[in-house]
Image: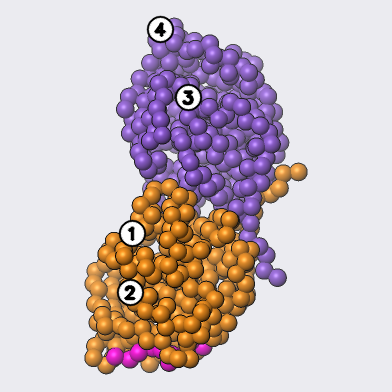
Chain colours: A purple, B orange
Amino acid sequence: MSLLVVGSVAYDGIETPFGKTDKILGGSATYISLASSYFTEDINLVGVVGKDFADEDIELLKSKNVDLEGLQFDERGNTFFWKGRYHHDLNMRDTLDTQLNVFEHFDPIIPDGYKNADFVALGNIEPSLQQKVLEQVTDPRLVVMDTMNFWIEGTPDALKQTLKGVDLLVINDSEARELADEPNLITAAEKVRAMGPDSLIIKKGEHGALLFTGDEIFSAPAYPVIDIFDPTGAGDTFMGGLLGWLAYTNDLTPHNMRRAVIMGSVMASFCVEKFGPERLKDLKEQEIYNRYKEFRRLSVIPEIE
Amino acid sequence: MSLLVVGSVAYDGIETPFGKTDKILGGSATYISLASSYFTEDINLVGVVGKDFADEDIELLKSKNVDLEGLQFDERGNTFFWKGRYHHDLNMRDTLDTQLNVFEHFDPIIPDGYKNADFVALGNIEPSLQQKVLEQVTDPRLVVMDTMNFWIEGTPDALKQTLKGVDLLVINDSEARELADEPNLITAAEKVRAMGPDSLIIKKGEHGALLFTGDEIFSAPAYPVIDIFDPTGAGDTFMGGLLGWLAYTNDLTPHNMRRAVIMGSVMASFCVEKFGPERLKDLKEQEIYNRYKEFRRLSVIPEIE
């Protein structure tokens, strides 16, 4: 099945307690595309980059079968740049610099060949742009969307409008609480689903994730990573693993949605092992399936005889 | 197998957004005993109460087969009293009043008939008192201990001494991080186990629990409770369900420890449904086993064919 990915393509400057990078490839559309490329070959990316965008990054995406017809090259400026520093507690980070650059005028134009995509991934960008994407695609099987506190607080009306066209929302726990204005996560989930998305995934970082679909709740464990090197992109990678698996299997039953959540978790657990998307460049299929099995072992509750 | 429970027996005054109580039965030893009583009949309680302790509370404990030979009646004062108010976000509470009363001079004297207990539950009291208990018992099969930030900060040396004699420590995530002085929970767990306890359970409230035993990590989900009425005693109830199950099965394999963690979670999920220990008074066996099955359904990760 074909997957349309719309989001940011960026350069990141990252400092963690373990090291530092200058400008490395980043952005939600990048992580989603790279992670999903391990499961499906029909990936179509829509984003914008500037005149500084490196050939080797183009080559990386192409080598993963990511179609770049929808990637706009804007020669008037540089690529979106973000610089941040993580604390000793990697759950906390400070933004040191944000340069929107060409991303400031991003207009997500969907090439005709992408419009009949089966699966649509709306990375975390302005809700009105996500809405624009939805107006261009024709009857996708599943629309998956990410958002963040910035939009929940800054553009709540546009966000709520966009949510009506979304099938599966993927957000973290603080975002779910804020969006629903409700501290109890289970109640918050009900309220968010009433806003439009049939299904909801709440990411809880080191505590795993919750999937709400149909009448079911699935509690996915987190992988016990001792040496988290760099958390950048973990959430987008989760979405990529999830969508890659769904596009590969084309099965949206609750049963298979559980597998997709774990596949997202698997890919995110790899992502944090190295700087940026480094670990997503050369994963082996066997590594992925082995880690899936580790997730299963981690959460087995034995029957009572 | 026999279970020795040492801890506080108290009265609590509780305010939640949903209601208010005056003085109702509470205390770690109370919750542990009541929760374990659903699995094992040989429960021996050591604690202290004052002249205000009500006959009906004695009768309740007796009706659950809790032996009270070790319960000291101190006529010089009243029973330990705690009063607290929970916020709209039930993860937060303010202590409004603490009256130690007779608990201030509590000396945990273990009756001779209790000393050969198979399982020992050390509720959250001063580490030096927990140590005193360990000096009186003879070769228990499993010593399980709870503690809190107050002792981690206030009496770290005594705490670390006591930990050396403990087989399984049950604490929450912020306590684990503080005790180990380490933000990564998995690394923190390694450091805490190096202090003495072979096994460790980290309770994560609404995020479930992690069990570290042998070379295994088990990630237990939280039950998706929409209507948490009163969180008081949930942690102690967890410990009671856990120990009750272990005393009943007398099986300390990692496999059965997983069941015990879920049984603890099951009992805690009932506890929060009503004020104080109310819900622990009349549970049905079938309710308990049904909820155990719900926990299993919640966390099943399907195989990949």
Give the Cα separation between the discs numbered 2 and 1. Answer: 28 Å
| Residue position for label 3 | A26
> For numbered disc 3, what is the local secondary structure?
strand
- The residue drawn where x is 50% and y is 32% is A274
Residue B71 is inside the magenta segment: yes
**Depth check, front residue: A34 or A1:** A34
**Left of B183 or right of it: where is A120?**
right
Give the Cα separation between the discs numbered 3 and 4. Answer: 20 Å
| Residue position for label 2 | B128
| Residue position for label 4 | A76
Amino acid of disc 4: Arg
Residue B254 is inside the magenta segment: no
**Left of A103 or right of it: where is A268?**
right
Which region of the structure is painted magenta?
A: B64-74
Q: Nearer the viewer, mark 2 or mark 3?
A: 2
Q: Position of residue A73 (x, y in %)?
A: 49, 10
> For numbered disc 4, what is the local secondary structure?
loop
Q: Is residue B286 above or below residue B41?
A: above
Pointer 4 indicates a residue of which chain?
A
Q: Is residue A138 above or below residue B20?
A: above
Give the Cα separation between the discs numbered 4 and 1. Answer: 51 Å
Tell me, yes or no, whether dots 2 and 1 are on the same chain: yes
| Residue position for label 1 | B92
**Residue situated furthest right in the rendering:** B305
> For numbered disc 2, what is the local secondary structure?
helix
Q: Is residue B176 above or below residue A71?
A: below
